[in-house]
Amino acid sequence: MKNTVTERDILVKQIRRINQYDAVRRFFKLLKEMIDSLDLPPNSAQIAFTVSEKHPRISANLNNHTTLQISGRKENVSLGLLFKKGLLNKALLKTDSITFEDKNSSDFILGRIKYTDKHLWQNEGIVQYWIDSLQDLKQLASITNHRELHNRAVYQAAEDDAFNSEVLGLAEKRYEITGVKSTLNDSKEEYKALAEKPDIPLNYILYGPPGTGKTYEVQQLCRVYPHTFVTFHQSFSYEEFVEGIRPETIGDKISYRVRKGVFYEACLEALRKAGYQSFEGCITDSAESRHARFGRAEPVCLVIDEINRANISKVLGELITLIEPSKRLGANNELWVTLPYSHERFGVPVNLYIVGTMNSADRSIALLDTALRRRFHFAERRPDKTVLEGKVIETTDLGKLLRTLNERIEFLHDRDHVIGHAYLMNIDTFEHLCVVIRDQIIPLLQEYFYDDRRRIQLVLADNDRWGKPSECKLVQVKKQYTSSLERDLFGEDLDNAENIITYQLNPALVEGRFEDLPKDIFKWIYEKNN
């Protein structure tokens, strides 16, 4: 029997021949699902995982049936999955994207799905039909005829994440696995052109009040590059961002697997742009080769919206150091670590741009973790009243309205809580302006000033000294209590209850009777009309 190193080398060479790493990774994930679902030990007499000598093909056999197979090269790769013939009437399987090969009178049939239809490889319904079929096949309990061809490295690559990374890492190298010094055979043409890079730092945060266009700007910046978008929240964790152990139900069994997070996947995508297929393959490459590959690699962006809502130290953990430009894979002082759950080696590629947005109304930049502030470049975005210049709705100049509101908010609160221009940008009718004031701006002021109606009145010029007509006031006095009113309400005079005032929003505004509102109701906010 071949030793495991030889079996590994045979597998590595076959993966190279196939030369479609997305398909190979999916093959091993499906194989792991088959092994776990059927509870197949590595020495089971029912299985034979084989690597073809003549063809670019890897097969998983159970009870003399090919249950899973990857074959072909590059874009011509396909995956074969075995189904019970009794399931062929299922809607998911009645598609031209699955080609069935009925070669015998068996109750089972192999369905082949091409790389162009690879989304079906991950279809939960199709995978479940496949697993259900294999459960029935296992009950036949026969001994496979191909046991002598069994390659243990195939089984190990499915079950052992570290070994899987090693195999893929070796496969993506363009040299033979021998004791001789390795020599790269990569074509220079493959990396001849430097990829155009974004004109921003590797770690970049746009911060400012809400509605200042931060998220829109980031989306426009990254739209021409491969990118991933994620929004942080207070419960966001390392396990979601990098990797963690999560329970999975397969059939009637619960298993626990290491699942990769959005940051890991973004780093892996950046790695692939440099021609690597795994972190192990990248890290075991020479520093000179890494530097050359990453220098020509296409940029990848990870967009983190509301980056300040999560606990950054908790989310990034020990990886906070690795995001520094000088510590990235491909940089001069590159570092990598061993991840705590998968025990894989991991680093952050130098072609990954981490772009965050931060709402300064939620949390001031001064309160951010020092480690985060030191590693990121910050660019402030303020309300841009110029985009509203000359825009008048009825009698209301939106540019003047925004400027006046923000000057008052900054005076009464601070500059982090002003209102962004995006709130007023797309307004084209008086009714639309009424809705935005009622449903967005006033609730925002209530939040900022903790429902202190007196200060909200000052922002909206509803205080008596401004001289607004009562029908133009947005926050109106509902009732001012005197001693007699207190006695009518409670039957006695209350201590410390002098000058109690209750407020209400303009009834016509609240009820949507916008036609009953004066057309200059919002002009009064920034300009006295008397």
Image (cartoon, rainbow, N blue to C red):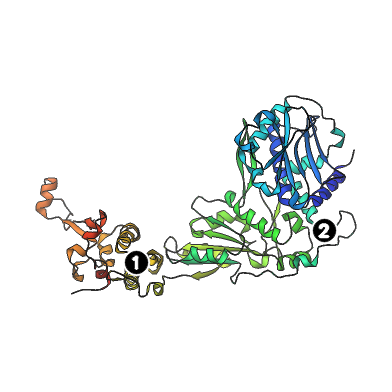
Residue type of the residue flagged with mark 1 = His
Asked whether the viewer can see residue 518, the reply is yes
Residue 308 drawn at (x, y percent): 49, 59
State the image quarter where residue 405 is shown: bottom left
Residue at 71% in and 64% down: 334
Q: Residues within 10 Å of mark 1 (few under 14, many from 20)?
A: some
Q: Secondary structure at mark 2?
A: loop
Describe residue 12's horizontal placement relative to residue 481 as left or right: right
Asked whether the viewer can see residue 287, the reply is no
> Which of 407 and 138 lies nearest the eye of the viewer?
138
Residue labelled with disc 2: 174
| For marks 1 and 2 on the same chain, the one whose residue lies earlier in the sequence | 2
- 253 lies above or below 112: above
Q: Secondary structure at mark 1?
A: loop
Residue found at the far front of this picture: 96
Image quadrant for the N terminus? Answer: top right
Task: Name the front one of labels 1 and 2.
Answer: 2
Residue 524 drawn at (x, y percent): 24, 70
Residue type of the residue flagged with mark 2 = Arg
Residue 466 drawn at (x, y percent): 21, 71
Q: CA distance from mark 1 to mark 2?
A: 62 Å
Describe residue 1's horizontal placement relative to residue 165 as left or right: right
Residue labelled with disc 1: 413
> Which of 476 and 448 lies nearest the eye of the viewer?
476
